[in-house]
Amino acid sequence: MGSFSIAIRDLRRRLLITSVTVASITLAISAFLCILPLAENFEIAVGTAMNLQMYAAERQSVTKVLYSFRQPNTPISSADEIRNLKGVDIVNPRTEFIAEDPRGYIDVNGTSVAQKLTALERRMRGRPLSIFGIDPESEDAWWRKVVTDDGRGLRDFVTDGSYISQPGECLIGVDMAEYYHEQFQKYGIGVIGVGDNITLRPGMIAKRGTTGGATHGTITLRVVGLFKTLDDPALDRLGRPEEAWSGNTILIHRKDAERLFAMEPDTVSRIYVRYQEGVSGIDIINNVIVPLRKMAEVAPYFITPTGAGTMGSTRLAHTTTIVISFIAVAVVIMNMMFTRVYERVRDIGIMGSFGATIFRIMSIFMIQAIILGLIGGALGVSIAFMASRLYPTLISLRFTVSLVAAPLMLAVGLALIASIVPAFRAALYDPLTAMRYGLEAASESIVTKYMNPIYKKLVKMKFLRKRIYTSLAVRNLLRRFTRSLLATIGIAIGIGLFVQLMITSQAIKSQIAGGEVVVEAYQTALALVAIAIGALGTFNTMITAVLERTGEIGAMIAIGGEPKHIRRMFRVEASIIGFIGGVIGALIGLFAAMLPFLFTWNFRGLNWLMILSMMGLGLFLAVGISYLSSWYPSRRASGMAPAEAFRLEY
């Protein structure tokens, strides 16, 4: 019989444990897929509540991350789609580029502004230059409605010449023209004026922390006008960043920007969005943000002003949540698969005694891991998309090939890793030792060297001497140290995620002047998913412990063990795991929650009473979830007849 046939037969024979394993992988993958958009939507809800400037841009991709000299290619056609969304007042497509230093890359009437500088010189003495590719009419309308409060458009700030109207033309800030004249007179540069020609050359690199990109082409533009925004009373009173434009900005047509930055035709780097007056935060999310997230080519983002610690903390908290969620899901899947294989050391010993090679044993467990991973991953993706359809505001997922393939690969990969390691170790044991001691053979060195002395000291305690089944629970945890450790880690990560989310979201919510209701909805959803992950890991561990220990339970019943004592033993095991995991998880959550605030140096909303209460709630949930998770397994174990327990294999 081939390895594949043996693997399938074993899965069918142990149908209940197979079903539990598939359910574990399914729920873990679906929880992870749900928490990804939830964490991102929480950040968006905070940005909306803070009334930050929103824009749409090309979705982040591996290409964009690896090739940072490339400008985002946001289709300008998306502007029309966004403009038609309910609640949107006006949109403005714009290509933005901020160079470290333009010297050596700009010619005025054929004369270079300055010699080229080294990268270090540019960073040390550079004056940033902004090159904005605009749609003239859209930019002018944007200034009338958004930038100014007196109805002036960008064309009204032109002091000499005319407003830009077509490709090949540009506007220069008056203050920038005077700066070039003062700094570079030795190169023969006069004050730039209307009619001069400016040539922009390839090689300018974007300043760090900006939209990225670099100049790749050469374009020559005619100056058609000069504009003045610095020291404008209205812009200064409103605190608008556009006030600085005339000091360091060249405005060009978006078509010229496409050639300069080697962009795709009819694309810009950003599409700014302005909401209608009086639209509530929840309506913005439902009618603008959610449809934007479902668009294939763009995604919503927010501009964080300098010193905006709240949004900076939220973004770091978003990243921390994703990292901890991934670890939690990985622990749940690996814990389940590891326990499933680890509890079958005796079976592996039997296979070895009949001449099965290590490769044959490994291939059987690898085939099972792949099958379970594929089935669980596929079901998890399906459940996540169903949840997205039912709750589109909270969980907004787009169906893409990568979004389906990545969870499947994750589930299969984790299942393989968690199956191969214990199976390989068990296959190396002497078959007689493995058949005689089973799980203890795999933990023999740990039990003998470390756990037995600890257990001997514990059983001398008066409390444990009077409670024999409590003593047995402690003994089981120490004897099955690896499984106990994995279970503790599983619930610690789940509770850590919960505590981190609660502390972070409570602190951020207290910093927001409005929109707390919207933020609280995402906070609650994230907390529920975190609790589900912690509960999932604990329940799976307890149900597996019962299903794989039917023979041991049968022996206890046969020698006179009472059902209530067996139930107590399993519940004590779960409570101990829950308490230890809860303490560790609360500390993990505290550390993870403090990181975003430490990096942004933003401690508003943090107080020790709130922090300790969240940690205490996490510990209470850990013990409560563990105890409740043991209820069904303990009832099942105590209700078995001895003959049934010895006979059944799950």
Image (cartoon, rainbow, N blue to C red):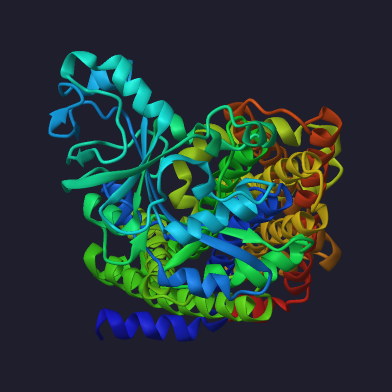
Of 71 and 556, nearer the camera is 71
Of 43 and 445, nearer the camera is 43
Q: Position of residue 235 (x, y in %)?
A: 62, 36
Q: Which image quadrant is residue 597 in? A: top right
Q: Position of residue 650 (x, y in %)?
A: 56, 78
Q: Is residue 285 above or below residue 155?
A: below
| Residue pictured at 34% horizontal, 63% vertical | 267
Q: Position of residue 111 (x, y in %)?
A: 14, 28
Q: Is residue 2 left or right of residue 591?
A: left
Q: Is residue 204 left or right of residue 253?
A: left
**In this orientation, does residue 469 appear?**
no
Q: Is residue 594 above or below residue 153?
A: above
Q: Residue furthest top?
A: 186
| Residue pictured at 17% horizontal, 41% vertical | 202
Q: Is residue 410 left or right of residue 617?
A: left
Q: Which image quadrant is residue 117 in? A: top left
Of 506 and 626, nearer the camera is 506
**In this orientation, does residue 628 appear?**
yes
Q: Is residue 512 above or below residue 609?
A: below
| Residue pictured at 36% horizontal, 21% vertical | 179
Q: Which quadrant is home to the N terminus?
A: bottom left
